[in-house]
Image: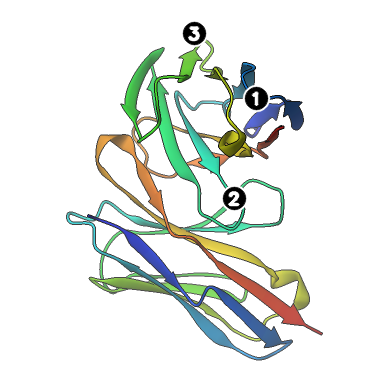
Amino acid sequence: ETGVTQSPTHLIKTRGQQVTLRCSSQSGHNTVSWYQQALGQGPQFIFQYYREEENGRGNFPPRFSGLQFPNYSSELNVNALELDDSALYLCASRDRGQETQYFGPGTRLLVL
Amino acid sequence: EDQVTQSPEALRLQEGESSSLNCSYTVSGLRGLFWYRQDPGKGPEFLFTLYSAGEEKEKERLKATLTKKESFLHITAPKPEDSATYLCAVPYNNNDMRFGAGTRLTVKP
């Protein structure tokens, strides 16, 4: 059974640029959530995707957007990057009928 | 507002010194309480799910318990490899999972 994978592992961008982060869900999982984790804090929910549609969103502006593909993999896009967007971005997957989520290793984004 | 609070923020133990971490929550209609372990720079690793007051789950030196307002993660005779940040989380509305800020545990040999 393959776990959740994310790419890239690290990324450096400058303010105003755009970034795309990728996530492959664990085998058999059809629901993907994205979280932002600032240093020293717990993960914060960005949004969730199920059946290729956004299925819940946290308190993040529209410049945070996403996609889910038929194979359940997902992308997180962030436009007009700000310095405060520097964080660890986590992807988690689960089966729709279960509450337990399993996390990937994360992508560390640094905005300069 | 519904929220999750963890205490203490940081805990330093000697190897073999047992202790407990606390997670208190105010969300109504609990649909489970989740414990994760997170090593620096890595994604959270799932430990336990608890669904009802009185429930207990164990894994090696860890035991999680749940009451109507809080959960405890008991660590018995910890080893240095138990050093990590321990996070608790509860499902919120709109498919949101609310996490506490975590307890950073350091176990000294």
For mark 3, name the chain.
Answer: A
Contact? badges 3 and 1 (CB < 8 Å): no
Dot 3 or dot 1: first in sequence order is 1
Question: Relative to residue B13, is residue B91 depicted above or below?
Answer: above
**Tag 2: amino acid:** Pro
Front-lying residue, A64 or A69: A64
For mark 2, name the chain.
Answer: B
Q: Which residue is mark 1?
A: A15
- Outermost residue, top side: A70
Front-lying residue, A111 or A56: A111
Q: Which residue is mark 2?
A: B44
- Regarding mark 2 in the picture, which secondary structure is present there? loop
Q: Which residue is mark 3?
A: A70
For mark 1, name the chain.
Answer: A
Specify whether B97 is left or right of B73: left
Residue drawn at (61%, 19%), measured in percent from left and top? A16
Residue drawn at (31%, 36%), measured in percent from left and top? B95
Expressed as whole percent of the image width and height from the top left, the position of residue A18 reads 62, 16
Tell which tag, 2 or 1, sits nearer the viewer. Answer: 1
Report, in whole angstroms, how far the alpha carbon at label 2 lies from the one at label 1.
28 Å
Question: Relative to residue B5, is residue B72 depicted above or below?
Answer: below
Expressed as whole percent of the image width and height from the top left, the position of residue A83 reads 61, 35
Residue B25 figure quarter? bottom left
**Tag 3: amino acid:** Pro
Asked if badge 3 and badge 2 are on a common chain, one would say no
Specify whether A60 is left or right of A79: left
Q: For the residue carrying disc 1, how many other residues have a C-alpha within 10 Å: few (<14), some (14-19), or many (20+)?
A: some
**Tag 1: amino acid:** Arg
Specify whether A22 is left or right of A10: left
